[in-house]
Image (tube, helix red, strand yellow):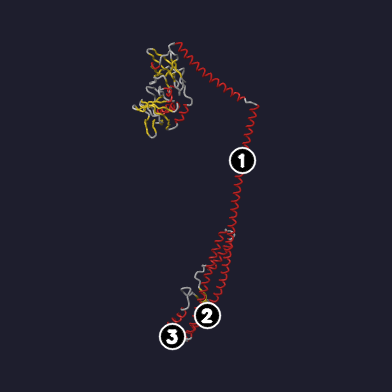
Amino acid sequence: MTRISRTYNDTMQREGVSAVSADVIFASSRFPNYKIGANNQIVEAVDDPKVLSMRQVVACETAQLLEQQKRLSVRDLTNKFEKGLAAAAKLSEEARLREAASLEKHVLLKKLRDALEELRGRVAERNKDDVEEAIAMVEALAVQLTQREGELIQEKAEVKKLANFLKQASEDAKKLVNQERAFARAEIENAREAVQRVEEALQEHERTSRAAGKQDLEELMKEVQEARRIKMLHQPSKVMDMEHELQALRRQLAEKSKYSILLQKELAISKKAMGDSSNFYEIDGAELLGSYLRIQPSCDTAPDLSKCSIQWYRIAPEGGKKELISGATKSVYAPEPFDVGKILQADVNLDDHRITLTTTGPIDPAAGLGSYVEALVRKHDVEFNVVLTQLNGVNHPSESIHALHVGKMRIKLCKGKNTIAKEFYSSSMQLCGVRGGGNAAAQALFWQATKDLSVVLAFESERDRNAAIMLARRFAFDCNIVLAGPNDRAPSPN
């Protein structure tokens, strides 16, 4: 009886394993866990019965997709089909790996059977039973593997069929998405065109309505004008007749008023002549702001005025308070804003004889001057063009244009960029009309900025001169300063 030593067994095992493992690549790192069941059937052990196979997972998801196909949107359906297609591809890959592993198992079993057959011829009778039992187990395992391969082929066919179905469904879903997208775009374009058509129709309707309304308005105006013309031609209005009558009465009243004033002046002159036969002079000129008054002889026997001394006064109509006008000692005097509403009086002294002359009534204000000054008060600074005629009592030869700025806080006189005088309102400042000076007195102004600086300025018009005086006195009064002429007691401006 042949004895098999431990060394021989180890050598045989190494040779057998070396011959098998030289040409085989195992799909896993361990041998499958098999056990023999009833009737010597080889059964593969299942690790976890709760874990589903990939085939069952794909079938379950396919059923869910078919159930939710009616409820899902096109985009969700596409995503689901794409997921199913990816799962099918993964299942196909696993099937390919299983096929490769099955092929490896066949090769392994064949080489294992050859090794056992070779071993059976070498071992003793006592160990032949074990070898034959191993050979039977390998043959049973080969049969089981063949059955498994058949199932695997069938499963592979089903998976391939499912993959083709999912691929076709995914393509159909993509086509459906493209169709829906094209339909949506077409609907959007149609809606845009419809909105544009509606907007154009509305604009056209609006233009037509405007044109029609304008045409109707013009026609209505023409009809109204024609009706008025016909009415005026055939039925003169009583209102127009009354307006014509009122205008005629106003003209007559103005003429009679002028004539009445002239008669009053002549009456006053005649009364004075009858009361004092030695009154050789009279006051001539319009008795209103913006003009000038002149003392002139009333007869040929009147003494020369150059030999007489003259002094002008202002007298209040109520109370008869007499106020001396300082510096008004010429035969010509131009009323200033302080004289409005007062009677002017001139005393002509010849040796020991005094002749008193007065205006026929109070000095009237200039027309429109009040509203003009109110408009200027709203400005922060008002500029007037003036000519400097005197500087500190000396005639100024230059007749260049200067600028007089009357502001809310100060008065400034400048020529271009050069400032001649700039002073804030103060109690030492004096401002009034020039008292004397011939025909130009109504346009001249006297301004004493400081004790050492005084000027006489000629304005472009009487209106500007009087406006400058009233404006400066208004701004000075706002600063609690009374701005007047020399020795004047000025009332507060209105």
Q: Quadrant of the C terminus?
A: top left
Q: Which mark is residue 402?
A: none
Which residue is rendered at x = 35% and y = 28% of the image?
453
Looking at the image, is mark 2 or mark 3 nearer the viewer?
A: 2
Residue farthest right in this picture: 234
Is residue 98 left or right of 297 when viewed as pictured?
right
Find disc 2 in the rendering and name its residue: 139
Badge 2 density bin: few <14, some 14–19, many ≥20, Cα 10 Å: some
Q: CA distance from mark 2 to mark 3?
A: 25 Å
* Residue in the foreground of this view, choosing between 67 and 96: 96
Is residue 168 left or right of 293 when viewed as pictured?
right
Vertical arrangement, residue 49 with respect to residue 399, above or below:
below
Q: CA distance from mark 3 to mark 1?
A: 125 Å
Find disc 1 in the rendering and name its residue: 211
Q: Which mark is residue 4?
A: 3
Which residue is rendered at x = 49% and y = 15% of the image?
266
Vertical arrangement, residue 412 with respect to residue 108, above or below:
above
